[in-house]
């Protein structure tokens, strides 16, 4: 029997958590945090509105910590 078997390649999804947070300005899930650990800065940007903040971070900060800082900053104004 000339039946060909195709090998199935199962792709595992990368265990990367999408780092989109809820924007404190427009309320949409479009906030991306870019961490620059060398400069100890995090850049927080919203894909939907003009939110763009730069915060200083500590070496052990996670993106969520930088995000929390921006939320404080924005809501405190
Ligand atoms: Zn926004």
Image (cartoon, rainbow, N blue to C red):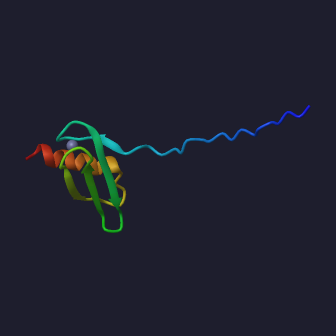
Res 54 quadrant in image: bottom left
- Where is the N terminus found, in terms of image quarters? top right
- In the picture as drawn, the residue positioned furthest to the right comes out as 1
Q: Is residue 6 left or right of residue 12?
A: right
Count of numbered labels shown in the rendering: 0
Find ligand 1 in the image and state its quadrant.
top left
Q: Residue at x 17, y 41 (%)?
A: 25
Residue 39 x %, y %: 31, 68
Q: Using residue 38 as the reference point, say whether residue 4 is left or right of it.
A: right
Q: Residue furthest top?
A: 1
Frontmost residue, 61 versus 73: 73
Residue at position x 35%, y 68% in the image? 38
Examine the image and state in which quarter residue 42 appears: bottom left
Which residue is situated farthest in the left direction here? 77
| Residue 32 locus on image (x, y percent) | 31, 49
Vertical relation: 17 (above or below) 60:
above
Residue 58 locus on image (x, y percent): 31, 60
Query: Is residue 2 or residue 71 the one in the foreground?
Result: 2
Name the outermost residue toward the front: 2
Give the image quarter of residue 18: top left
């Amino acid at each position: 029997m000339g039946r060909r078997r195709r090998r199935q390649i199962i792709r595992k999804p990368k265990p990367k958590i999408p780092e989109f947070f809820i924007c404190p300005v427009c309320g949409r899930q479009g906030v991306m945090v870019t961490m620059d650990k060398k400069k100890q800065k995090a850049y927080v940007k919203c894909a939907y509105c003009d939110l763009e903040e730069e915060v200083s971070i500590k070496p052990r900060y996670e993106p969520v910590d930088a995000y929390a800082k921006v939320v404080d900053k924005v809501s405190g104004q």
